[in-house]
Image: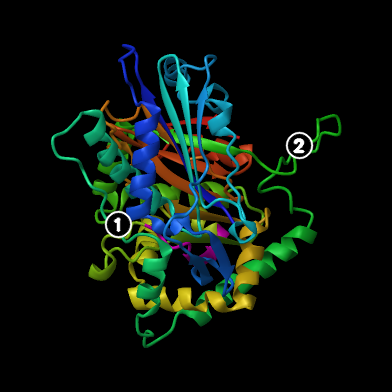
Amino acid sequence: MPRCAVHFYFHNPDQQAGFMEFDILRNTFIQTLRTSLPLALATRMQMTAFTYGGLTASIVDDPPLPPISKHTDDTRTVRRMIDADFAPSTQPPVIFGIPIQCNPLVGDPLVTLDVVYMADGVGIGLTFSHAVTDMGGVARFCVEWSRVARSHYTKSATEHKPCVLNNDRSWFWPCICAEPSPPTPPFVTHLEALATATDTCTHADSSNHSNELFESADTDSNAEPRAARSPIYRMSISAHGVAHIGSVRDAVCPGVSIPNLISAALWQCISVSSPHPTTYFAASLTARTHPTYADYWGNTSTMKYMHHETHQVCRMPCAELARVIQQNVASFTPAEFAYIINQYTSESYLQKLQRFVENDKAPRVMVSNMSRLPVYETDFGFGRPAKVCCPLDVPHGMAAFFPRSRSGGIDIYLRVSDLVVQNVVNHELLKDHITVIVYE
């Protein structure tokens, strides 16, 4: 089971005394955890179904504390990280190397906290098991934690008490699953799309073209063998670049979100590299548009799948493809959303889903849009973070959108071949606004 991991880096160039003192960080973290995400303090997890929503937990009155560690690293500086755009090699290994897979059923901790003190700043590495919440819940927790800590650091006359956030799965899952079934259940067509995709992936494994999409197409016998798994790339678009893409959006497809327009470009870049007749697209879904779930920031780990003929995706204007994506996501009602989540107790469905997600030859892009999460609102009393990173072990073809900086912009974490990356950096919509580094 994956963890939601987030890394914060706070710069202290003036060597301010008492900068993010550890005891206050630790104590307010525990205080906020007990009120805002108590599920993370569970002492025993038990599987009652086949996915996250079927996990139940035992929470005792005085649970043991999660792993909270303090480190010192004199070899790293926040200034050097800023100059290198926070390339992985410049980040403290104790944070960047945190495992992002865990198994709570065998006792792995549901939450971990590592704090690293450097010469000119502090790094915070935080993980939550997906059994507790998703990245949206983590972001809101961090903002709340920083408010509690800030009232201590600034010695405020009024201590900020942590709030109940209602964004862990023990609250959300029963609420969404209580939705009435839709008049025309989408699950059958959803399952058929996955089955078709799985068959396509299986056929791709045995074809002569199976390695062309996500691995090198170089047939030079003298070439060094490539790793079986493509790396994760971080594709960054600055705030200025996002604004420019927004002006293009306003002209050619008003009403479509900027992430959906970028997603259309990514789908084209993957499709043009695919030898297969059909390519697939999946978008993360959210129920936040429904008043009942307005405070829930997550996507509850489900996506809506669709597919088109590859040549159509390649030839279709990017704006038109973006409208297709927008309609696909916007057309899902909370009832339909709940209906699919309820089917997560179907083992056959999960097997098809797992085969599709894990197959590294699937001609697809899966977008999880977290670009509006309030991670840069995390302020412990010493200013907002210089950078917030989102380390992900994403499967092939998955694109995770994340806020780039406190001034705006988008970081896209994407595992694909270098051939697809070249298509991205040369795409008409993106080429003047995107920078790429290998993130794994």
Which residue is at the front of the view, 177 or 403?
Answer: 177
Q: Name the mark nearer the viewer: 2 or 1.
A: 1
Q: Earlier in the sequence, mark 2 or mark 1?
A: 1
Q: Secondary structure at mark 2?
A: loop
Looking at the picture, how far across and down is residue 267, in whole percent? 50, 52
Residue 371, visible in the rendered structure: no
Question: Quick check: 436 left or right of 162?
Answer: right
Residue 100 visible somewhere in the drawing = yes
Q: Position of residue 259 (x, y in %)?
A: 36, 49
Q: How is the image coloured?
A: rainbow
Would you call the spot at circle 2 few (<14 residues within 10 Å), some (14-19), or many (20 or more)?
Answer: few
Q: Secondary structure at mark 1?
A: loop
Give neighbour class at mark 1: few <14, some 14-19, many 20+ (Cα, 10 Å).
Answer: some
Please give the residue where the numbered disc 2 appears in the rendered image.
Answer: 226
The residue at the point 43 percent across, 19 percent down is 78
Q: Position of residue 196 (x, y in %)?
A: 62, 72
Nearer to us in this view, 152 or 343 = 152
Q: Residue furthest top?
A: 14
Horizontal relation, residue 349 to residue 14: left or right: right
Three-letter amino acid code at the position of disc 1: Leu
The answer to which of 350 and 11 lies nearer the viewer is 11
Q: Is residue 166 magenta?
A: no
| Image quarter in which the C terminus is found | top right
Circle on res. 254: none
225 displayed left or right of 14: right
For image coordinates 55% across by 58% down, the residue present is 311
Name the residue furthest right.
Answer: 221
Q: Which residue is mark 1?
A: 165
Look at the image and give the residue range highlighted in magenta. 298-310
| Residue placed furthest toward the front | 62
